[in-house]
Image (cartoon, helix red, strand yellow):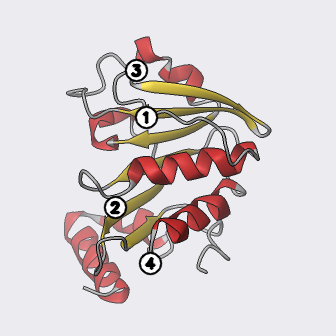
Amino acid sequence: MDQGAAWIKAMSCAARQGRGRLRRLMTLTPPLVLDLADEAATAALAARLATRMRPGDALLLEGPLGAGKSAFARAFLRAASGDPALEVPSPTFTLVQSYDLPAGPAFHFDLWRLDGPEGLEELGWEEAREGISLIEWPDRLGALRPADALVITLAPGATETSRIATLTGWPGRLQGCAP
């Protein structure tokens, strides 16, 4: 399904669900769909987005296992820090890693091992929301999912190394993100 068809389907669904949801969707811009040829293209997108993040922003990374969520987060944090050699371990076991960036604190969450939002308070969720948050497996957030977040859905592309990135949210802030 192409970008336009997906947008029309979302609007139709919202209309059936009620005016409030339709009104919210009408204020959003259509999703931005990008073909990323390889990990370098994914890293370049992450670097472009890193320049747009500010304290209080959340970036939700969705997609199946192996879609490139951790690689995206690693490239984002390296670009945002200005240090291409920054060590960025996966937070799969620690659940959260924190970073001191020039723009302020950043928190990288991997919620794969959580069943829901219980336990987020112990991970410093409230503090993290004041900084920049990158969240893998955001479906585990439940009602704590930030409504104003940028959602990046990564999916396998036509080749083993390519990905399709669908960006939704952030009306007016994604200009220039396409290569």
Q: Quadrant of residue 51?
A: bottom right
The CA distance from mark 1 to mark 3 is 8 Å
The CA distance from mark 3 to mark 2 is 36 Å
- Under tag 4, what secondary structure? loop
- For the image, the number of numbered tags is 4
Q: Nearer the viewer, residue 177 or 121?
A: 177
Q: Quadrant of residue 94?
A: top left
The CA distance from mark 4 to mark 1 is 23 Å
Residue type at mark 3 is Thr
- Under tag 2, what secondary structure? helix
Left-right relation of 94 to 8: right
Earlier residue among tags 1 and 2? 2
At 29% from the left and 19% from the top, the residue drawn is 118
Earlier residue among tags 3 and 2? 2
Residue type at mark 2 is Arg
| 10 Å crowding of disc 1: few (<14), some (14-19), many (20+) | some
Residue 124 visible in the shown view: yes
User: Residue 37 shows which numbered tag?
Assistant: 4
User: Residue 90 shows which numbered tag?
Assistant: 1
